[in-house]
Image: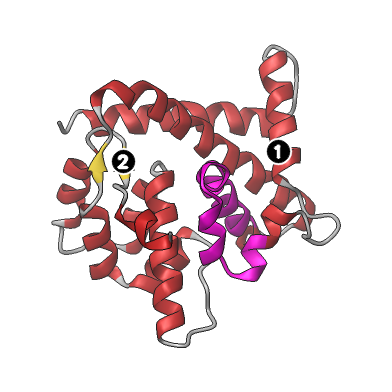
């Protein structure tokens, strides 16, 4: 079953591969440069997570990735680039839905990270929550990805995380409030959510120029 899942194509937004090839052709490309592009590709991030966890298992590493940076570190720069270039552009008829989901995913991840930093006061923890938010729509569609998540990451989806930690449900409920009354004063997290959506749209439009 897992083998069949791996054979399914990994889709990315329009123009991503073209821009990604340009970015990675630079000899000075960094993990940060790649990570900044991957935040808008939830399906690809989920695929890379599976590969990174498999790689860790094969070599007996206990340092399972909990962030995009951790995924890239686990796979290494060369393998990360190779896996990304093997992805496929989303079919033309599905672009609008796929891009809308990408915007929703990125903004959800931002809200979850902001809630985590507000409550826990640690930016490194907020990065972990951002990662959970980013892959959550993929997990919702295909629970098999949880097989490749280590226990700590899986807790975010099982509801067994420590008291006080923000949950995906809380973030989604907060976003629902934003949507119902976008003119109200919801505070700084609303501002972060709104700007995240604008930033994601701009990034997707920018990638589309490379077709």
Overall secondary structure of the magenta section: helix
Residue 12 is tagged as 2
Q: Residue furthest front?
A: 1
Does residue 70 sit above or below 18 in this rendering? Answer: below
| Label 1 neighbour load within 10 Å: few <14, some 14-19, many 20+ | many
Would residue 188 be visible to someone looking at this image? Answer: no
Instruction: Please state which of residues 69 and 62 is positioned toward the viewer in this rendering.
Output: 62
Q: Position of residue 169 (x, y in %)?
A: 73, 40
In the image, taking residue 96 as reference, residue 157 lies left or right, namely right
Residue in the picture at 68% in, 53% down: 157
Chain part drawn in magenta: 126-154
Q: CA distance from mark 1 to mark 2?
A: 25 Å
Residue in the picture at 44% in, 45% down: 42
In the image, taking residue 180 as reference, residue 94 lies left or right, namely left
Q: Which residue is mark 1?
A: 171
Q: Is residue 149 magenta?
A: yes
| Label 2 neighbour load within 10 Å: few <14, some 14-19, many 20+ | many
**Figure quadrant of residue 168:** top right
Would residue 5 be visible to someone looking at this image? Answer: yes
**Figure quadrant of residue 92:** top left
In the image, taking residue 164 as reference, residue 2 lies left or right, namely left
User: In terms of secondary structure, where does tag 2 sit?
Assistant: strand
């Amino acid at each position: 079953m897992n083998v069949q899942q791996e054979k399914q194509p990994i889709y990315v937004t329009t123009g991503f591969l073209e821009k990604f090839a340009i970015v990675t052709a630079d000899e000075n490309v960094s993990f940060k440069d790649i990570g900044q592009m991957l935040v808008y590709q939830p399906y690809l991030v989920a695929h890379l997570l599976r590969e990174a966890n498999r790689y860790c298992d094969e070599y007996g590493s206990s340092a399972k990735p909990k962030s995009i940076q951790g995924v890239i570190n686990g796979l290494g720069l060369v393998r990360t680039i190779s896996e990304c270039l093997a992805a496929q552009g989303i079919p033309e008829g599905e672009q609008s839905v796929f891009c809308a989901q990408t915007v929703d995913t990125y903004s959800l991840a931002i809200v979850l990270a902001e809630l985590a930093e507000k409550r826990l006061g640690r930016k490194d923890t907020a990065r972990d929550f951002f990662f959970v938010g980013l892959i959550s729509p993929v997990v919702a569609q295909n629970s098999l990805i949880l097989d490749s998540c280590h226990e700590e990451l899986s807790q975010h989806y099982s509801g067994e995380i420590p008291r006080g930690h923000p949950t995906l449900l809380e973030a989604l409920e907060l976003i629902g409030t934003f949507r119902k009354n976008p003119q109200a004063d919801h505070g700084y997290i609303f501002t972060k959510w709104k700007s995240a959506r604008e930033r994601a749209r701009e990034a997707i439009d920018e990638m589309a120029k490379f077709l």
